[in-house]
C-alpha cells in the first residue's frame, strides 16, 4: 500500500528523474508485490483446505 502511494508521489513530483525513472520503476515493483501477495494468499488458502480434507478422510 505504501509503495503504491510512493508511486503516485513520484509521478506527481516536479523532478523529471522521479517522474520518468522512479515513477515507472516503483509502479512495476508495486505491481509485482501485489502479485506475490495474492499468490501467497491463494497458496495458504489451498493448503489449509487440503489439510482439512486429509484430516476428514482418515
Image (cartoon, helix red, strand yellow):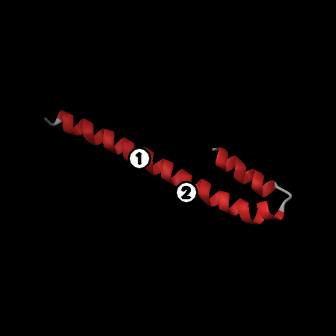
Left or right: where 53 falls relative to 14 = left
Q: In which quarter of the image is the N terminus?
A: top right
Residue 49: image quadrant is: top left
Viewer-nearest residue: 35 or 13: 13
Residue at position x 65%, y 49% in the image: 3
**Disc 1 residue crowd, few under 14, some 14–19, many 20+, Cα 10 Å:** few
Residue at position x 79%, y 64% in the image: 17
Number of on-image labels:
2
Residue at position x 72%, y 60% in the image: 23
The disc label shown at residue 12, or none: none
Q: Quadrant of the C terminus?
A: top left
Asked if marks 2 and 1 touch (Cβ < 8 Å), the reply is: no
Residue 44: image quadrant is: top left
Left or right: where 3 falls relative to 19 = left
Q: Which residue lies furthest to the left in this view?
A: 58
Label 1, secondary structure: give it: helix
Residue at position x 77%, y 51% in the image: 9
* Whole-percent x, y for residue 52 in the image: 26, 36
* Whole-percent x, y for residue 33 in the image: 55, 52
Residue at which label 2 appears: 32
**Mark 2 or 1, closer to the camera:** 2
* Whole-percent x, y for residue 20 in the image: 76, 66
Q: Which of marks 2 and 1 is nearer the N terminus?
A: 2
Viewer-nearest residue: 15 or 27: 15
Label 2, secondary structure: give it: helix
**Disc 2 residue crowd, few under 14, some 14–19, many 20+, Cα 10 Å:** few
Residue at which label 1 appears: 42
Residue 14: image quadrant is: bottom right
Amino acid at each position: 500500500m505504501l509503495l503504491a502511494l510512493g508511486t503516485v508521489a513520484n509521478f506527481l513530483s516536479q523532478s523529471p528523474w522521479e517522474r520518468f525513472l522512479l515513477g515507472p520503476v516503483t509502479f512495476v515493483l508495486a505491481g509485482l508485490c501485489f502479485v506475490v501477495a495474492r499468490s501467497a494468499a491463494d497458496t495458504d488458502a489451498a493448503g489449509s483446505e487440503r489439510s482439512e480434507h486429509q484430516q476428514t478422510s482418515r
